[in-house]
Image (cartoon, coloured by chain):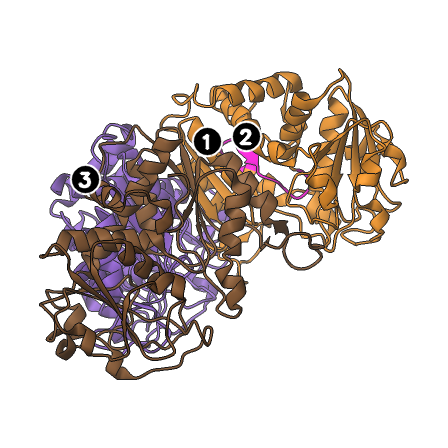
Chain colours: A purple, B orange, C brown
C-alpha cells in the first residue's frame, strides 16, 4: 500500500483489521520501523481525534512528527491549474505539496468539502493535487468525500465487539443543526459493503448517498425499522447529496433513543464523534454500557498505526 | 500523587520542592521514566511559560508530547451536563476528555476564568469535567481559580534564594489596565500558608481574596507598610473577588518602585510574568540585581518536571 | 558561530556550503550532537518551508523542538524600552526573550517588516531585542531585512547545479500584487556579493536595494538584458526601498517567461517560494526541467542543519 485514501487502497481488509488489533496489544513493537522517518500532518480544518491519534500512532512507530495548520501557520493555497495568481492565494499546491514532500516521508492531509459545489467536492481536488504533487505517500485524514481512517477504526471496533460471525450493522442518519459532509457515511458504507457484515442504511428520503458509496446496502426510510435485531447502531448526520449540502429534515424521530435501542439485539452504539448530545443521540444511550464511542475513538490510534506501518514497509 | 490541581494534592511540600531542585541539577536523569508515555497539553487560553516549560519538562522525562490549542485546532466544547446541544458547541467534554484520555497517559489543561460569573468560575467546571471524564491524571496548567505549577515554582525559587530559615514573604497587589484572574494570588497564598514562611498580603480595600485562599495570612491595606523588612516582594495584579472581576483601584502608589524596595531587607523581586512594566513594577526594580523574575520563570521547568515525575511514578 | 542573522556571521562561506552538502548525504550522522538540547522556533509570521525544514534539521541533529506562534499561542510583545505598558501589549520582549532563553539552547525567530517605517524596519528591533535579551544563540528565520537561511540554501543550490566555476547569477525583480519585504533580495545580494559568482541585479527604476546590500553588484533596469548568457535566474518581487514599501511598477515585461529564459545559457530557474504563478513567473518556466525551485526548497533542510550543527558545536 502506497497511498491510503479509500477502502480501495487496502488489498486485504481483514489482514489490516488484524494488524490494528495486534498493534493494540504491542503498541511499541515497531519503534524502530519509522526511525529517522518524518510524517507531516497538514490540517486545512479542525481536528481532535485525527490530530492526536495519528500523531501518537506515528510516534509509536518511532517517526518524527510535524503538524501544520495550513492557513493559520502558513499560506492559503491555490488548487487550480493554469490560473493567474493575482488573488488572495499566495502559493500554488504544485509548489507547496512538492516542497512538503521534500521534508516528509509520508504526508497526511485533512481537507473538508465546501458543501456548495458537489462536482468540485466530489472531484477531491485538494487530495488529488497532493497525490499528484507531493511525490510521497498520502494518507487521507478526512477528505471531501471520505474518512477512511475512521472507517478502518470502525471495522476494528466491530471486529472487537461482535458476538456473531456476521453481525447486523445499521448506519442510521440522525438530525443535526448544521449541514455536515457525507464523508463518514460514504466511507462507512463502502467499508461495510466490503466487510463480512449484514449492512443497512436508514435515512429520510432525500438523504440518499451517492450510489458508488451506498452500493448494494439495504436502504430504509423508517427511523425505527432498521433497529430491530441490530447488533451495531452507527449514528451519523449528513447533509443531502441530492440537494447538495442542504438540510432537508430535522425530525427528532431520527434521534437515537433508548426506546429505539430497545428494539435491537442489545446493540452496541457507535459514533465517530464529535456528537451533539440530545440532538443526534440521547444522553441515556451514549451514557449507557452499550455505548462504545470512547473505545471506538481510542481505536483510531491502531487504525492509523496499521496504515502507517503498512506504508512504511512499502517504502 | 495522581492529579495536580492545588497544594492539597501534594503530601510533602518540602519533598516536592527538593525534588525540583534535584531535577534542576540532573535534568536528564530520568529520561527512561516517561519512555513510551504520552502527555497531552490542552490550551483553552494563551500560554508562553507554561506551554514551553511543561513541554520541556515532559521531554526531559522522555515522554512524547502532544500540544493542542482547543478551539483553534479542534472544536468548541460543551461543559454542561444534560443540555440539548443545538448551539455552537460541537462536542461535549464528556466525549472530548474521555477520548483524549484514550491517547494520553497524563493530560494538562489550561482554562482561564471568564470573570463574569463568580460561582461558575469558582466551581472550576472545566477542570473538574476533565478530572471526571478523562480517566487519566490531570495537571492544572492554570485553571479558573488556581495556578499551582506557578506556586510550586515560586516556593522552589524562594527556597533557592532565601537567606533566613523563615523569610518574610509579601504578596503585593499592583495596578493593571485589564481585569485579571485571581488564580496566581489565590494559589500563591494557599501555598505560602502551608510553607514555612512569614506571609503577608498587601492590597487595597475591596481586593480581599476568597477566605479559603487568604487563610490566616497577615493582611494590610497600606501600599508601603508590608515592604518594611521583607525578604521577598511578590507582585501581582488581580481583579476584585468581592465585586467580581471588577477593577476598583488604579492608584500608582501600589506600583512596585525602587523607593518602596528600599524599605525591604534587600528583598528579591518576584513576579509570575507576563508583567506590565512601569504599571505593575518600575523598570528600575525589574532590571535591578534583586529581580529574580527570569530565574523564577526558568524554575517552571523543574516544578513541572517534579510534578510529572511524581505522577509517572504513581501510574 | 554563535548567532546566525546574516552572511557576516559566517567565517568561511564555502566551508558552510560544503557542510550543507555533506549533511545532505548523511542526514543522521550527527543525531547525538543535539541530544538533550532544545530549540525554540518562534513565529511572529506565517511560515511553511522555514517552519518544517528547520524543525526537521533540528530533529535530525537529535534536538528537542518546540514551535510557538507568538501572538496566536501566547502574548503580544512590547519591543520598545522604557515605555509605560498600559496598551495592548501584555509582555515586554525583555522578559519573554529571557524566559525563552531559560528553556532553549538555541532560539529561532521569524519577524517580518511592517513596510511602513523604513528606519524602524531596518533597525531590526525585534531580532536585536531577542539577541540582547535571550542569552542564547539566535537564528534568524527571516527578519525585517534579511533571510539568511534562504540565502545559504540558494548558495548550496547554485553550488550543486553550476556547470562553470564562476556562474553568471541574475537576481531579477518580478511583479506582484502585494507589497513584499526586501529581505530575500537583500540577503541574496549580500551572499552573492561574497560568493565566487558573476552577479547582476535587474529591476525597474525605483527598486534599488539599500546600498549596503546591493554592494558592487552590476545593476540593470532592462527586464531582458541581464538574461543573456545567465546560468541562474533568481526571480523575486520586492517593494521599493526608496519609496518605502510602495509598489511602483507592475509591468508584466518583468515576469519571467519562456521567451526570456531562451536568452540565457540554459539557465536554471530559482525562486525562494511561495511564488505567484503567471504573475512572477510563467507556468511554462516553473514547470520546465530547468526549474529547480523544489530542489532549492528541499535544500532548506541542509542549510538549517549546517547552521544548527555549527552553533551546537560552539556551545
Q: Which mark is residue C22?
A: 3
Badge 1, how many Cα within 10 Å: few under 14, some, many 20+? Answer: many
Question: What SS does tag 2 mark?
Answer: helix
Which label was assigned to residue C135? none
Tell me where residue A315 sits by quadrant. top left
Q: How many angstroms separate mark 3 from mark 2 (CA)?
A: 39 Å
Q: Is residue B51 left or right of residue A227?
A: right
Kindly indicate whether the residue at mark 1 contacts the one at mark 3 (C-beta within 8 angstroms).
no
Residue C108 visible in the displayed image: yes
Q: Earlier along the polypeptide chain: callout 1 or callout 2?
A: 1
Q: CA distance from mark 3 to mark 1?
A: 33 Å
Do the residues at discs 3 and 2 belong to one chain? Answer: no
Chain of residue at mark 3: C
Identify the residue at horizontal 40%, vertical 69% (top origin): C180
What's drawn in magenta, residue-wise?
A: B131-146
Percent coordinates x, y for residue B301 in the rendering: 53, 31
Secondary element type, mark 3: helix
Residue B304 badge: 2
Q: Residue at x 36, y 77 (%)?
A: C177
Let me know if residue B93 appears in the view: no
The subunit letter for the residue under badge 2 reads B
For this rendering, which residue is in front, C212 or A271? C212
- Residue topped by disc 1: B58
Amino acid at each position: 500500500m502506497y497511498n491510503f485514501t479509500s477502502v480501495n487502497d487496502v488489498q486485504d481488509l481483514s489482514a489490516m483489521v488484524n494488524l490494528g488489533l495486534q498493534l493494540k496489544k504491542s503498541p511499541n513493537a515497531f519503534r524502530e520501523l519509522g526511525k529517522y522517518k518524518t510524517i507531516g500532518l497538514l490540517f486545512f480544518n479542525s481536528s481532535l481525534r485525527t490530530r492526536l491519534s495519528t500523531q501518537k500512532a506515528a510516534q509509536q512507530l518511532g517517526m518524527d512528527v510535524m503538524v501544520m495548520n495550513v492557513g493559520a501557520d502558513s499560506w492559503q493555497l491555490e488548487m487550480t491549474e493554469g490560473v493567474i495568481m493575482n488573488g488572495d492565494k499566495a502559493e500554488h499546491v504544485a509548489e507547496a505539496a512538492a516542497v512538503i514532500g521534500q521534508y516528509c516521508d509520508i504526508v497526511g492531509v485533512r481537507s473538508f468539502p465546501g458543501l456548495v459545489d458537489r462536482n468540485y467536492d466530489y472531484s477531491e481536488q485538494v487530495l488529488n493535487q497532493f497525490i499528484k504533487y507531493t511525490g510521497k505517500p498520502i494518507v487521507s485524514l478526512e477528505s471531501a468525500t471520505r474518512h477512511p481512517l475512521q472507517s478502518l477504526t470502525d471495522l476494528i471496533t466491530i471486529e472487537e465487539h461482535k458476538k456473531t460471525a456476521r453481525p447486523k450493522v445499521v448506519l442510521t442518519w440522525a438530525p443535526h443543526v448544521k449541514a455536515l459532509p457525507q464523508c463518514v457515511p460514504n466511507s462507512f458504507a463502502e467499508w461495510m459493503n466490503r466487510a463480512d457484515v449484514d449492512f443497512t442504511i436508514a435515512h429520510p428520503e432525500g438523504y440518499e448517498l451517492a450510489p458508488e458509496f451506498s452500493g448494494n446496502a439495504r436502504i430504509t426510510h423508517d427511523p425505527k425499522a432498521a433497529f430491530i435485531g441490530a447488533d451495531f447502531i452507527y449514528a451519523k448526520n449528513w447533509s443531502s447529496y441530492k440537494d447538495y449540502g442542504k438540510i432537508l429534515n430535522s425530525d427528532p424521530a431520527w434521534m437515537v433513543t433508548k426506546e429505539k435501542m430497545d428494539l435491537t439485539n442489545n446493540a452496541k452504539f457507535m459514533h465517530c464523534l464529535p456528537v451533539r448530545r440530545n440532538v443526534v443521540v440521547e444522553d441515556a444511550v451514549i451514557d449507557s454500557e452499550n455505548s462504545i464511542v470512547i473505545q471506538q475513538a481510542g481505536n483510531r490510534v491502531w487504525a492509523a498505526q496499521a496504515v502507517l506501518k503498512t506504508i512504511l514497509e512499502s517504502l
